[in-house]
Image: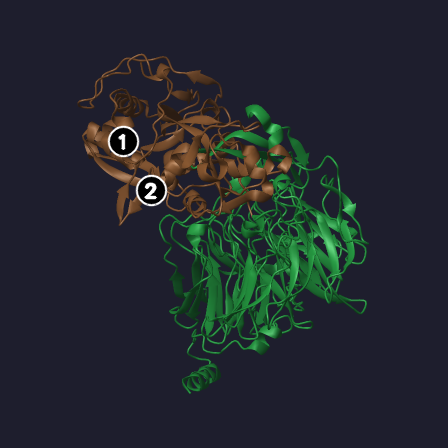
Amino acid sequence: MFIQKLIPSRLKSNIGHGGNLLRSLYLKLLKPQSQTHKASGSANLLKGLLAPLTLLVCANPTPGFALSFDDIQDRGVISVAVYRDFAPFSYRENGQAKGVDVEIAQIIADALGVRLDLFELSADENVDDDLRNAIWKGHFLDRKKADIMLHVPYDNELARRNDLVVLLAPYYREDMVVARDIKKLGRDATLGHFRYEKIAVELDSLADIYLSAAFGGSIRNNVLHFPTIQEAADQAIAQKAFGLMGPRSMVEAALGEHMAQYDIGKIPTPGLSRESWLLGVAVKSDYRQLGYAVGDIIAAMVLDGRMKTLFEKYGLTYTPPPASFYN
Amino acid sequence: MKRALFTTAALGWLALGALGSNAALAKVTNEDILNDDKNTSQVVTDGMGLQAQRFSPLNKINLKTVKKLVPAWTFSFGGEKQRGQEAQPLVADGVMYVTGSYSRLFAIDVKTGEELWQYDARLPDGIMPCCDVINRGAALYEDMVYFGTLDAKIVALDAKTGKVKWKKKVGDYKAGYSLTATPLIVEGKVVTGVSGGEFGIVGKVEARDAKTGELVWSRPTIEGHMGTLNGKDSTMTGVKNASWPGDMWKYGGGATWLGGTYDPETRQLFFGTGNPAPWNSHLRPGDNLYTASRLAIDIDTGEINWHYQTTPHDGWDFDGVNEVVSYNLDGKKLAATADRNGFFYVLDRTNGKLQNATPFVKDITWAKGIDLKTGRPMYSETGRPGNPMDAEGGKKGKAIFSIPSFLGGKNWMPMAYSPVTETFYVPSNEWGMDIWNEPITYKKGAAYLGAGFTIKPLFEDYIGSLKAIDPRTGKIKWEYKNNAPLWGGVMTTPELVFTGTPEGYLKAFNANNGEEVWKFNTGSGIVGSPITWEQDGEQYVAVVSGWGGAVPLWGGDVAKRIKNLNQGGSVWVFKLVM
């Protein structure tokens, strides 16, 4: 069966758009533009400051079918894509949509003065696929699209590969951390301990690949795999494993009230390809105006402390994007 | 009692023969299924016989007459769901049963092409089938017709009305399971594998009571997992941790997504298994049994009689799912299979011992050959994709060029065997892939270490290649070259070989020398398997048309050769014009 693979999205977009190979593929940071927004109540904080990651599309732009900024205002509804079953960011509790991303989506809709239509996205094999399914093409089963998508890594290389979307408005930084059981391992335990003790990971995550390969494979036999990070954390809490590795927010949410029993943080991880990354918003590349409006709303939340408060409401440590983005 | 009455009624109607009755009232018995390779008046199994030789002795359409083959009728699946028609139709008692993409099943009057009924499975929201929306066909038994759905259920319908008789969950679609293969019905049991592209699934083969859907036995394909028989634990598959490190066997892959075949002579099922997970082989030292293997399974108990692993410690995504075709030659009970990895294997089907293995595509890079003594590949030292730790510091890993590509020397599309020419007709593709570790990838918002790849054609003028292979020597007797990759099944008769092309043609070739003797364009690409049968003294040929499947989803550089192909969804039926 098909394995986890990365398909260069450039090729996919060519398939999807009748093989238009003329699209120019150089990366360009857009010059800041000043403009006014219809968005009520949102100060134009970002004037000249926010630089969306994008590719300039030189060939004829593909006509878009999702709504433009003006259409969203006219129709009175914005569709925001979030991941399905993705605590603590977007999940359902007793049928009610909850989580950090769900609340950000609601704040965006409120600031634009429109109703929120939550687009729950089943994750595909990688974010490139998700961008195709949620933003620029729609999934092949129903072809529905969202106006914007949350929780998209803000990354130059990802932007270069996905020329039909714009990545913007990073709202927090995610770090790869290891939670280590203090009672069992003492404080400041290193990965070396896990040559002798079990460590739990989510199946097929970066932590899984890293721990299965690092240090000449000497940890491999002690890695316990679970379909979700919550199940991995539950086993750690039940003392079946004494470590848990993954993105900080996922590790913290999964350990919940047991967090205090763990040393949680970045520790030396030689050979780890990514130690931290930023999470932000994606819009379709020809929806610049919508992108700027959403960027302003996110920037205001980061700067006035609402974002931090929101993360803390869910028991999460908040790490803002570098100050250079928003001051 | 009711059944007896129905049968009487059916006989009455047939005897009158005047009502133009389309009602499917005659029942498909176990005898019908066992004799499907010999009874030319119907096609009641996938593979035109349980051994799946896809051979029919019918010879009215032959080298001399084939030029007069013309459409008799055509039938549209309708709606907007025009893609990926990979089914093989069935014909029984005047009714054609054929599945369409998006989990649809149609019953059609075989004389007129009129629809009798249609069943549309209601698919849940948020379903994420990995590999297009295809379905490979239905199965018949007694008064029921069976098929699998994209949300991993097996559905049994009343063959007369299309109403649901029972429906059973084979796997959880939320965990990545799906079901696209044709169910296999043997001795009153409906036998299925399971599909799933996601990391974290474990393949299995299951047998259910065909009348009620109750599970009889279950056989997981990865060592360490427990099988069941009659509701109780039976035996463990293999030996836990014998060929897997740590707890990786728990989520080891080995999906049985292409279904299986059955050999009545040895009373064994033959199922192939998919690649191991995780995909990067450096993380899981060992053979990783029973991934990328063929399993011979006892029909009564679900025990594994023998296995043959085509790609031990797979690192290229060479699924071992391709069909095992049983045949007898020179007094031996043999089975042949043409693998993703580019080798054509002949096994003794009584014990799984390798008899011969030869390359059927050009310039294979991953192995120098197969050692006939040990049955193991002789790996090429430079042929394995890199270790993810080599992509240190966020740099792109070194690319290797690997032949075949992960789409395989041969993919799902079934080959045919002719006992007349003693030749296998194998639909294959000549392509390779650049593959590398790609450190800047993300999965569900989190950094990830994926593999990047690009599929590349090997030759300017063709990718697809239909080959006639002598199973005694592995020698290629003739080859037909096609511009686009071949993705449809093959069928053979004493003088002819039929297969479809993505360009839309159903083609017939001289079985002895490969000369193209007939073609007809069906208006969309053919990725299904043709059949032939006889009714009212005439020989018919049918095939579904509708471009799709994995190639347009994963095509890489191949995209240029297929970008102008149009989607569709229809059945075409042909017969000789007088």
Between residues B423 and B259, which one lies in front from this camera angle?
Answer: B259
Residue B116 lies in what quarter of the image? Answer: bottom left
Q: Say whether residue B524 is left or right of residue B1.
A: right
In this rendering, the label closer to the viewer, 1 or 2: 1
Q: How many marks?
A: 2
Q: Note the chain letter of the brown one.
A: A
* Amino acid type indicated by mark 2: Glu
Residue located 65% across and 39% down the image:
B431
Residue B537 lies in what quarter of the image? Answer: bottom right
Q: Position of residue B87 (x, y in %)?
A: 52, 58
> Which residue is identified by label 1?
A310
> Which residue is identified by label 2?
A120
Q: Do discs 1 and 2 share a chain? A: yes
Colour chain B appears in: green
Residue A18 in view, yes or no: no
Distance Cα–Cα, label 1 vs label 2? 20 Å
Q: Secondary structure at mark 1?
A: helix
Q: Is residue B83 placed above or below B228 in the rendered structure?
A: above
Between residues B488 and B303, which one lies in front from this camera angle?
Answer: B303
Between residues A303 and B165, which one lies in front from this camera angle?
Answer: A303
Q: Chain of mark 2?
A: A
